[in-house]
Image (tube, rainbow, N blue to C red):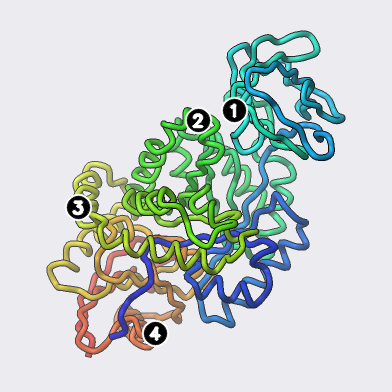
Amino acid sequence: MTAYTETRTKIVATLGPASQSPEVLDELLLAGTDVVRLNLSHGTLEEHLGRLRDVRASAQRTGRVCAVLADLPGPKVRSGAFPQGGCDLVGGANVQLTPAEGASTGELITVDYPTLLDDLQPGDRVVLGDGAISLRVDAVGAERVTCQVLTGGFVQGRPGVHLPSERLRLTTPTEEDLRLGAAMAEAGVDFLAVSFVRAAHDLRVVREAILPHATRLVAKIETMPAVQALEEIAAEADAVMVARGDLGIECPLEDVPHLQKRIIRHCVEVGVPVITATQMMESMITSPSPTRAEVSDIANAVFDGTDALMLSAETAVGVDPPAVVRTMNRIAARAEREASYSQWASRLGRIQRGQWPEGPDRITMAITHAAGMAAVDAGATAILCCTRTGRTALAMARFRPVPLLIGLSPDPVTVRTMALSWGVRSLEVGTYHTTDDLVWYAVERAVHAGLIGSGDTVLVLAGAPDRPSGASTDVLRIVRVA
């Protein structure tokens, strides 16, 4: 059979000026990109709709299964523009913030947030831009907030102003988010990432806005309220993103690695794909190779069990986007050889016995748990998950099985969305009317794709094809490929 050489940890790459040409986009997919991210904070809706079409065309040309994730901007508080050429904020100096429009200076920073004076308190931390510059609120007056510069630096343009999220009065999602989300869902985007989620309700608002489209929703965990509501958010979301940039502004930096592990562990346990994001290979925006610390960061995310690793500016504006993806692929592949997936599966099995829900999901969870053990006992080469919605493949992926995991679906949207899930190689198949046909043609399709071959032992998981969509997975066959 054809050796399986792709990484099982998936790669999300952000499209931008450096990667949007057809030639580079093709290279990006062939380098190992599984999901392309469109950052809706930059550019027009029409530009992003064009990029969605471009990704679809590239996937067709390269023969790659690739999903598209549109990342909604979310609420953004910004300062007024600093003088041309920028200015320095010196550590220890005093600056003032005021809720107003107009230009900012090194002494007075205007902020486009009307309730600034009501929502800040002495002792609060305010951060500018990507977190490099931080201020401490010393006093709140009738017209201005007096702050001390804790960490200084150079500012230019209109940087974001990060305020304590627990008191932030901006609505999530914003009206602009709902407008963009509805348009992207109608165009057929596979995932929508919802920024600054604070509760499961935020996701439900987006779902209602994009009806009748069933685009999957990714909850970005970037606030402490979201961390505290993790279980409820993960239950509502189709995937979760550990957005370490804003999360690192919301909490002490030393807490971020521990929160990352906690979020990933919970998502894997409940079968929700999880993406680790922000500054994974930031040095490769300008450099041909990553730092040693970045290599360790990627490997540790793999050890944590993340489904996917995300690249942002590295592929959007970096000097060589395909090289970044190839480098990340190599690092992830090396880390996977050391990952304790068998111990993870054993631990998860013990946890799940006491947490299985009632109803169809319990049957699916039980049979995927059994399949993981049967695959080891039978020496299986691959586990084939026949699924209409992708739920069977996601449930199986929780156990991080050693055999190749293949998701097969008659729904092209499901085929693409499975590209985000750990270890799943997804294939499109026809619709069949009997279990025997379903099993037979699933094995045949995997053989024709070069994923399994003669003499291999494979497991096939499916639901009876004559049952309604959403029914449980209740068929497990062990097949010897002729």
Q: Separation of disc 2 and disc 4 at Cα?
A: 44 Å
Instruction: Find residue 14 and report its horizontal and vertical position in percent.
Output: 59, 59
Dot 4: within a 10 Å radius of its alpha carbon, few (fewer than 14), some, or many (20 or more) residues?
Answer: few
User: Alpha carbon of mark 4 to alpha carbon of mark 1: how far?
Assistant: 48 Å
Please give the label number shown on residue 449: 4
- Where is residue 243 shown, x and y percent of the image? 52, 43
Residue behind mark 1: 165
Give the residue type at disc 4: Ala
Name the residue carrying label 3: 343
Residue 426 is left or right of residue 184, and the answer is: left
Q: Quadrant of the N terminus?
A: bottom left
- Residue nearest the viewer, comparing 312 with 365: 312
In which quadrant will I find the C terminus?
bottom left
Residue 265: mark in rendering? none
Q: Are marks 2 and 1 in contact (CB under 8 Å)?
A: yes
Residue at the image point whose x is 29% and y is 59% from the top: 400
The residue that label 2 is drawn on is 224
Asked whether 57 or 304 is in front, the reply is 304
Q: Is residue 76 above or below residue 91?
A: below
Task: Give the distance between the C-alpha atoms of the residues marked 3 and 4, in whole angstroms.
Answer: 30 Å
Where disc 1 sits, the SS reads helix
Residue 59 located left or right of residue 480: right
Q: Earlier in the sequence, mark 2 or mark 3?
A: 2
Q: Residues within 10 Å of mark 1 (few under 14, many from 20)?
A: some
Who comes first in sequence, dot 2 or dot 4? 2
Earlier sequence position, callout 2 versus callout 1: 1
Q: Position of residue 313 (x, y in %)?
A: 60, 54
The kind of residue tagged 2 is Met
Q: Relative to 245, is 391 above or below?
A: below
